[in-house]
Image: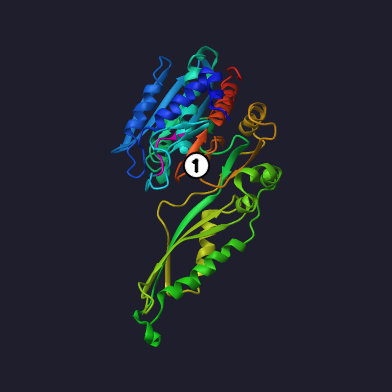
Amino acid sequence: MDATVMTTSPSHAAVLRLCREFIRIDSQNPPGDTRTMAQAVASALEHPAIEVTLHEPQPGIVNLVAVLRGARPGPRVVFNGHLDTFPIGPTEGWTHDPLGAEQVGDRIYGRGAGDMKAGLAIMVQVMRTLAERRGELHGELVLTAVGDEETGGRWGTRWLLAQVPQARGDYLLNADAGHPRVVRYGEKGVVWLRLASRGRACHGAHVHLGDNALESLMAAVADVLALRERPVELDEALLASMRAARSVSEQEGGAGEFDNMRSITVNLGAMHGGQVANLVPGQAEALIDIRYPPGLTGVQVLSMVEQALAPHGKVQWQAIDGSQTEPAFTDPDGRLVQCFLQHARRIAAPEVVANMRVGLTDARLFRHAGMPAVVYGPRAMNMGGTDEHVFAQELAQVFDVHLAVAGELLGGPAD
């Protein structure tokens, strides 16, 4: 598709310029220095009606909070996005400069293009657009742009929710990576595990004198993997919404997405043990990612893990500190989700659906704080990989939807 579609509207052209400007700024995490990105967003938001403050709870990790107050009282609508990106990694395989923001046709390339420099540009431009209509707005629009989403949010969204009152509001809108045909209203819970086993090392020819730690660990891991088979009882309304969304959502999220979201998933991410074939390993370690849907709590999941590992006395285990987060979802029949559906079906595609989300965003932290939250963003192609890119046309669509939703919630114009 020809990228000139973005120039049909001054706002669309502005979103594209902001997206490319932000991609050119290196904000890889690690190391996690977002000072330059925060300053760039602050400069983009220079307007008499917008108040911007910067917060640096840890050296280099800078969060931005921008507030646009309407002319009359009303709800507080909070935008949330992140300034940091995955690392670029080895440049072999990239055919475009990871920090070049090159545009080829409808595609805009670069690290963080989809996760989430594009979404950040969209939200900044929505705020700038609504600042020109301040007299029509009821309530406040707040943008929270945080510095450490990629590493868990301890000094970003978590810190802002605890320390900055403006970060809490009546609605949360997030433009992180997604798809214009799917409105995402919930996320699974997560816990990461570290399993470690100790045996007795010896020469591989004398196995009768040793105790293979890797074999002990493998048996324990197998019982943790079996948690995938545990049935989970989901809220009926939630399950009905997921079923209704399945046909469209799986076109974008892949076949099997529905089963993933309603089930416990267990991923063996790493296993280490031994050095060479002819030595019995005396110690071994495994790292496991467990994700679980609403209907379960972290306490329940850890109890399942404890039961699964009880027979494996040679294996010690722990939940990795900071990895745990509870599942949460926003009522799919509530005002925020329905508002997104209405405008997305009008602007993006008539078949737009609402569904849970497989991966995590900081939107979960706002749900935990009691706020209804939706993630609606453009596709992030090759997210975290080589030649990451977004589509200019989708930036335009997602911008129009967020502008319409924010405008409706604040009592302003819908388009």
Would you name the residue on which mark 1 appears? Answer: 361
* In the image: residue 398, left or right of residue 93: right
Instruction: In the rendered view, tell whether residue 60 sits above or below residue 53.
Output: below
Badge 1: few (under 14), some or many (20 or more) residues near its Cα, within 10 Å?
many
Residue positioned most to the left: 59
Q: Is residue 76 visible?
A: yes
Quadrant showing the N terminus: top right
Q: Quadrant of the C terminus?
A: top right
Task: Locate residue 274 relative to residue 306 in the image: left or right.
Answer: left
Task: Give x and y (percent) for residue 153.
Answer: 41, 42
Residue at the spot 50% in from the left edge and 28% down from the top edge: 122
Magenta span? 81-86
The prevailing secondary structure element of the residues shown in magenta is: loop
Residue 394 vertical position relative to residue 270 in the rendered view, above or below: above
At x 49%, y 14%, the residue is 132
Judge whether residue 175 can be spotted in this image: no
At horizontal 51% and vertical 35% (from top left) the residue drawn is 390
